[in-house]
Every structure is written in structure tokens, then in C-alpha cells.
Amino acid sequence: MNTPSTFSVGPTHVRRGFWVILPRPPAIACATRLLAGCLVAAACVARGSSGSAAFAQNAGAKYSTWSKVEAAPETRAYKENLREGGGLDATLRALLELTALPQLALASNRSTIERTRRRMRELLLTEIADEKAFEDASQVFLDFFGKLARDEDADLLVRINALLLVGELKAKDGKPWPPTAGPLASAARDAKLPIAIRVAATAGLARHAEAARATGDDASKALAADALPAIVAILREPVEKDTSVELDWLVSRSLSMLPSLGRWAPKEVAATLPQLLAKLLEDPLRSVDVRVRAAAALGAMVVPTSGVNGPQTIAAIRSLALSGLEGDDAIAASRRLEQEYIVLLGAPDATVAQPAGPPGLGQPGTPNTLAIAEQVGRRAAWRLVTLADAIAPLDGKGGLAVLSTNTGTQATDLAKILRDFGMNLDKIPDEQSLNDAVAAIHAPATGTPGPQAPQRQPKPEEPAAEEPATDPAASPFDSP
């Protein structure tokens, strides 16, 4: 999974009334590729102001800012003691609980809350020689910030960062610290918590899932005991109008964890998961990308005895593919109409290629032929190839085609069309490729021969793209 390793939550990141979690610039640069990870998860506006009672802790703090804690003599003593193999005695524990960790909530650190959160881990949880001392210090972090995240009297922005910090705690080997998985899963599924806090918890839990998948079956099996109940609870939540964007993000992240963890589900959960995923796939209230991810998870987990209606599911995938493409086509048509209107008015615009020479008022331009953004085309490519793999993976193992024994080759034929035209869209992400894909997917349903993807070539200055990634976490458009 491609969850950003560092999130930023602060007053400068605001989108339509929500605090926004953004990855750092390197992740944003990578997001133009389909192998990039999640870009955005929305969170609620932090309650109150910097002068509220929730921030009135500065007066009682020993040090007024985190930078002063970093330079304090007792902090240097803490580092030296633990670096030399000492244990976390009562004095060092008190430094953490009473002096250092409360800094996250101070108003004086508000503008640098992300740096404060990062530096706490870097300064206080590294270079600890003794294993028990490291575990003890990490447990203090977990207990303190886990409690702060659930403190309803604390400012919401502080609570979000507290749980983000819990999700960022690492073991000595650099992997997520295992004891945080349970508290993160508990917060992720707790519908009574503000959804912003649940987003932070799910981001941390997703790190655990990614690390477990890379480590092996034993790690995934251990994590599944904590994570699966939370994942299933999130998938079962009804869509609420006020939080549909944020819930989409939670469901997307949960679906991306399922393929590696679902195989360890208890029998009673495993018996109902396929039907739950099929219901998500067919739910018109869900976003297109959530439904694509549901198809991917279902294709990875399904077996002939799953109790899922194969022909109905394949038909739902065909309809979903068309819905996504036709939505993009409508956007392209609207953009093209706007460009033509601008040209008629003679107004210069960033989307209009102006003729050579000094531009003048009323001078007509030439409409830009690129009516859809490149990333929209690549998103469509990711959707199509992901749906193709959900039906019939290239390795021939599993997929929804195993459910369609009474439909002849319709399932595998559809998978080939989706993959071929998805690859074509990834290579040349323009409106013609999009329209070619729509026509091809429509053809089998009307009984006409399925068209072949045209042998078009990218422009000389545009190198041919790689095959679109089909990991459910790989799309740069997974954030609602």
C-alpha cells in the first residue's frame, strides 16, 4: 500500500471547511503516476481558537515551546542515560509525561505542530540502547497520546495529531510498533469519535497492514485479529451525507487492507465478507473509486463457494466501468464547451493556445485539443485495469470469472476488453481513447463484436507509459 509516511495537519491546510491531511511534496510529485499513494484525507475543522480554554496550558508548562524542551538540560540527561543502556526510571518517565509530551497541546507550538510531533519521536525514541527501556518509553507515548486523542476537552487538531503520532510509532527495526495496532483499530471503528480522528487511526493501521504484507503470513495473521473487526465495521457503515467524503476515504483504505488480511478472517466473518463486498460494488451511493476497490478486494478473495451471484457481479462491473468513463466523458464535453465559448469571446485563457505574435483584445485563439486532463485519463486506465484483474488476473489465479461458469466466456472477454482499453488509455490518456473504451465495453452487451484497441502511438515528446498499477492503494485518485 502507498500510504504516505508523513502527514501534515495544520492551520494552513484547509479545504472547503475541513482540515486536510496532505503528504509532503515528494509524495505529491509522485502522485501523477498510478504507482503513487494516497494524496488527501479530509478531517473536521479543529474546535475553538488558539485562545480557547483547551490551549490554556501554556501557563502551567515548565517550558513555553518545544524548542526549549529540546535544549533543556534534563532532555540531554534523558538522552545520555538511555544511550548508555540505562532504563526508563521514574525521573525519565516523569520528563516524558509531565514536560515533553504535553508540548503537543500547547498553543505556542500550534504553528509547528507537525514538526513538534515528528521531533518528539526523533528525539525521545531513538538511540535507546536497552530493549526494555525502548519498549517502556514507547508505551508511555502510546498511553499518553492514546488518552489525549480521546480527550473530548482537548482541541480536535491536537487530538488528530496525537493519534497520527501513535500511528507513526516504530519498532527498532523501523516497522510500525505492534502494540499500536489494537488502539488504532479500536479508534478507526469507533463511530462515536470525530471522523477526523478515525481517518488518522486508519492511516496508522494501513501502515501496519503494508508492513505485515511485506513481512509475511505470520505478521498478517497477527494483525488480522485486531484489524479485521475494524475493517468490517467500517465497510458496514451506512453513507451519511455530511461525512460521505471522509467515509469514502475510510472505506477505500479498509478495502486496500483486505486482500492481505482477509484470508485470516474467522469462519463467521469469512462467510459474509464476499456478500458485503458485492453489495459495496453494486451500491450507487458509493463513489466510483470505492466500488472499483470493492471489486478488486472481492476478486482477490472470492472462491466458487462464496455465495456471490457471478453473472450479476460481472454485469455490475460492466455497468461500473461505463459509469466511470461516461462521467469522465461528460466532464470532457463540458470543458470543451467552455473552451469554445472562450474562443468565441476572444478572451485569452490558460486552456487556449494563443496564436504567435503579440496578443490583442478580441483576438481569437485556438481551442486546446486536450479536453480531459492527463491524470483523469490515467485514473480511468487504473479503474479499467483494476476491474479486469478483479475478473481474471493475468496469473490465472482466482478472480470473479470463477463465479461465472454459466456465462461462457463473457467474463473473460470483458476482462480482456477492460485491460486492453485501459492500457490504451494509460498510453494515450485523451478523449479519443476514452470514447474508444466506452464503445468497446458497450459492444458485448449489444451483441456486436468487441472492437480491438486501436494501435495509436503517444506523441513523440510523451514516452509510452508502463502498465497501470492495479493495487487497490495505487491510484492517486483514491481520496474522495
Image: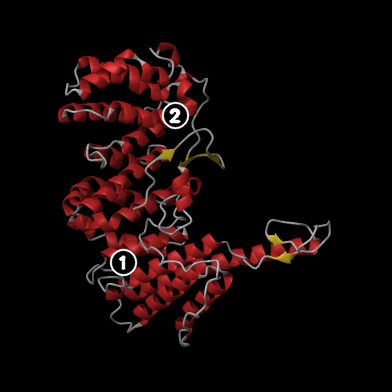
Residue type pointed to by label 1: Gly
Residue type pointed to by label 2: Ile
In front: label 1 or label 2: 2
Q: Nearer the viewer, residue 34 or 157?
A: 34
Residue drawn at the location 19% of the way across and 22% of the way down: 84
Q: Is any part of residue 150 visible from this angle? A: no
Horizontal and vertical percent position of residue 223: 22, 47
Q: Secondary structure at mark 1?
A: helix
Determine crowd level at label 1: few under 14, some 14-19, many 20+ residues with C-alpha closer than 10 A. Answer: many
Residue drawn at the location 28% of the way across and 74% of the way down: 403
Task: Please name the residue that numbered disc 1 is placed on.
Answer: 299
Residue drawn at the location 53% of the way across and 25% of the way down: 49
First along the sequence among labels 1 and 2: 2
Task: Please name the residue that numbered disc 2 is placed on.
Answer: 113
**Is residue 447 shown above or below 464?**
below
Q: Secondary structure at mark 2?
A: helix
Viewed as shown, does residue 456 lie left or right of 292? right
Q: Nearer the viewer, residue 405 or 70?
A: 70
Horizontal and vertical percent position of residue 344: 79, 64
Q: Nearer the viewer, residue 86 or 193?
A: 86
